[in-house]
Image (cartoon, rainbow, N blue to C red):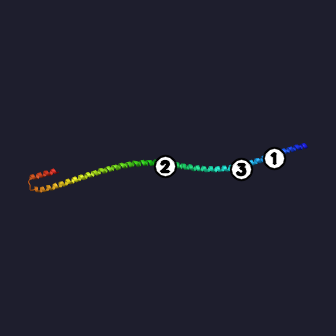
Amino acid sequence: EAGRAAILATYLKEKDNSVNETMRRNNNLLADKEMLQRENEGLRLEVHDLQVTAQQRSLRVQDLERNLAQSTEAVEFSEKMLVVSREQTESLEALRRRLKSQEDLVEERDRELEEFKQQARMENQDLRERLLALTDNNRTLQAQCLNVQTADKSTVQQLRTQVEELR
């Protein structure tokens, strides 16, 4: 029995050591589990923060895409307006050239008109002078005609010839 008791005592001691070792391992595992749970909770919080950040960034990306679409539309509109502006500028330049041509033509016509007026003034002056000369000649002839009434027919014929020559 003493041998048995020693065997049992050894066996119990081994079992105690085994239980102590298992408990120590169990405690270590529990400590590791708690540490892993804390890390897991930290990771969950970090995942949540990353999800919130990702959602915010997604909203920001959507805003940027909308802004990009609006900017693209604005650029396209600006390009169309630039084309229209260029066309209007070209049209305006053509109109300016046409206006300049018309102004040059008007100036030329004004010069021609002024020359024509000057020529008409000179012709009018010449006609006035001729009319005055004819009027004087006519008076002279009328005076001579009055004198001729008493003169002979040959003198009347001479006067008629002079009148014809003056005409």
Marks 2, 3: nearer the viewer:
3
What mark, if any, has residue 32 been given in the picture?
Answer: none
> Which image quarter holds the N terminus?
top right
Mark-to-mark CA distance, 1 and 3: 26 Å
Q: Residue furthest right?
A: 1
What is the three-letter code of the residue carrying label 2? Answer: Ser
What is the three-letter code of the residue carrying label 3? Answer: Arg
Marks 1, 2: nearer the viewer:
1
> Which residue is tagged 3?
38
Residue 44 location (% of width, % of height): 68, 49
What mark, if any, has residue 78 been given in the picture?
Answer: 2
Q: Report crowding for label 1: few under 14, some 14 to 19, many 20 or more residues within 10 A (C-alpha).
A: few
Q: Earlier in the sequence, mark 1 or mark 3?
A: 1
Q: Earlier in the sequence, mark 1 or mark 2?
A: 1
Q: Is disc 2 placed on a helix, strand or loop?
A: helix
Between 3 and 149, the residue placed more toward the observer is 3
Which residue lies at the image location 15% right of the left edge and 50% below the top edge?
165
- Seen in the image, is 57 located left or right of residue 146? right
Residue 118 location (% of width, % of height): 26, 52
Residue 29 location (% of width, % of height): 76, 47
- Seen in the image, is 160 located left or right of residue 99? left
Mark-to-mark CA distance, 1 and 2: 83 Å
Q: Report crowding for label 2: few under 14, some 14 to 19, many 20 or more residues within 10 A (C-alpha).
A: few
Q: Earlier in the sequence, mark 2 or mark 3?
A: 3
> Which residue is tagged 1?
20
- Seen in the image, is 4 located left or right of residue 157? right
What is the three-letter code of the residue carrying label 1? Answer: Asn
Which residue lies at the image location 39% right of the left edge and 49% below the top edge?
96
